Amino acid sequence: MTKDKLYAYIQLTRFDKPVGIELLLWPTLWAVFLAALGAAYGHVNPDMTIAVSTAASISAAPMLPSLSLLIIFTLGAILMRAAGCAINDFADRKVDGSVARTQGRPLADGRLSGREAIAAFTVLSLLSASLLLWLPHAVFYWSFGALLLAFIYPFMKRFTYLPQVFLAAAFGWAIPMAYVAVQGVPDRWCWLLFAAYMCWTIAYDTQYAMADRADDLKIGVKSTAILFGRFDVLMIAILQTVFLILMGLVLAHYFSATVLGLIPVYGLGLVALLFAQQNKACATRQPAACLQAFLANVWVGRYLFLLIAGSCVWAALASS
C-alpha cells in the first residue's frame, strides 16, 4: 500500500481528526465507571463474574472498573467510530463533492472506491466484534444494536430531518453495553444516562449541521439544523438544559450516598458555562463559529470524564 493510499484510509476513518473519537469515548467511559459504582451498591446480576475489581494501586474496594474493561471499551469506541466514518463517507460519496467542507474526502475525490469503503467498514466492525470475546455473552447480543445503528444512521439524512437522533443512538449504544458488561442488565439509571447523552449529542450535531446548512439545502440533505430553522439555537439550549438536568439526577443518584454528596452535581455548573459560550457563538449563524462551537464539546466530554472518574476514585478511597 502506498503512502497516498494509506493516508486516504486515515482520512476515510477520520483518524486524522480524533475529536469524534473523544465524543464517543468519554461518555462510554462515564458509563463504565458509573456502572461499576452501581455494582458496588449491589445492583449487579449474581451470575456476572466480570470487571468490577479495582486497580491495586488505587484501592481494594470494588467500586472501580478493571483496567481490562476500560481498555476493551476504549478500543471498541475507537474502532466503531472509524467504522461509522467509513460507512458515512460511502453513504455521502455522491454529495460530498458538492459541499466545500467535504469535497476533499477520499471517496469524493476518487482516491478510494465505494467498495474499499465498505471493506474498511467490515474490517473495523470485525475487529471491534473481536473485543466481545473478552466480555460476557450478553454483551454480544447487545452489540447487534450498535452495528445496526452504525450502518443505518448515515443514510437517514435522505429520509428524515432527524438524522442526529440516529447518530446519537449509534454513538450512545455503548452506554447500555457497558452496563450489561458490568451489571448484567441495563437499569433505569443506565437509560437516564443514555437519554442525557442523546440530548447532548443531538445538540452538538445540530451545531455541526448549522455549519453545513446552506450546502445541505442546495443538495437536498436533511438535518435538525434545517428542521429547527430560526429556532436552532433555542432548541440547542433546551437540549443542553435537559442534558444538565438528567445528568444532575444521575450524579445525585450515584454520589449522594458517598462522602462526596452532591459535589459532583454542582460540578455541572462549569458545563453550563461552556454551553453558554457555545450558544453565543452559534447565535451568529456563521459556519466557522458553529463548527468551533461543535468542536468545543470535546471539553465537555473530557471535563465530565474527569469529574465522574475522579469522584468514583474518591468514593472508593473513602470507603477503603
Image (cartoon, helix red, strand yellow):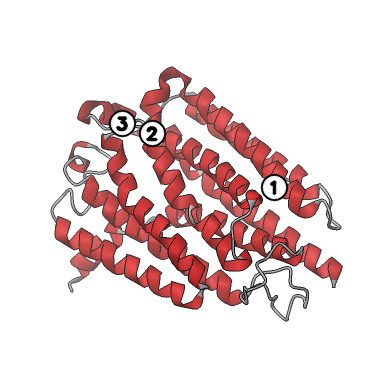
Identify which residue, 222 or 209, lies in the foreground. Answer: 222
Location of residue 122 (image quadrant): bottom left
What is the crowding at mark 3: few (fewer than 14 residues within 10 Å), some, or many (at least 20)?
many
Location of residue 39 (image quadrant): bottom right
Q: Is residue 14 visible?
A: no
Q: CA distance from mark 3 to mark 1?
A: 33 Å
Q: CA distance from mark 2 to mark 3?
A: 8 Å
Q: Amino acid at mark 1?
A: Val
What is the crowding at mark 1: few (fewer than 14 residues within 10 Å), some, or many (at least 20)?
many
Residue 225, position as x, y percentages in the image: 40, 28
The earlier-in-sequence mark between 2 and 1 is: 2
Q: Amino acid at mark 2?
A: Leu
Which numbered tag is attached to residue 162? 2
In this rendering, is residue 149 above or below 320? above
In this rendering, is residue 147 above or below 127? above
The earlier-in-sequence mark between 3 and 1 is: 3
Residue 29, position as x, y percentages in the image: 58, 60
Q: Secondary structure at mark 2?
A: loop
Residue linked to disc 1: 250
Identify which residue, 310 or 179, lies in the foreground. Answer: 179
Residue linked to disc 3: 222
Name the quadrant of the N terminus.
Answer: bottom left
Q: Is residue 37 left or right of residue 317?
A: left
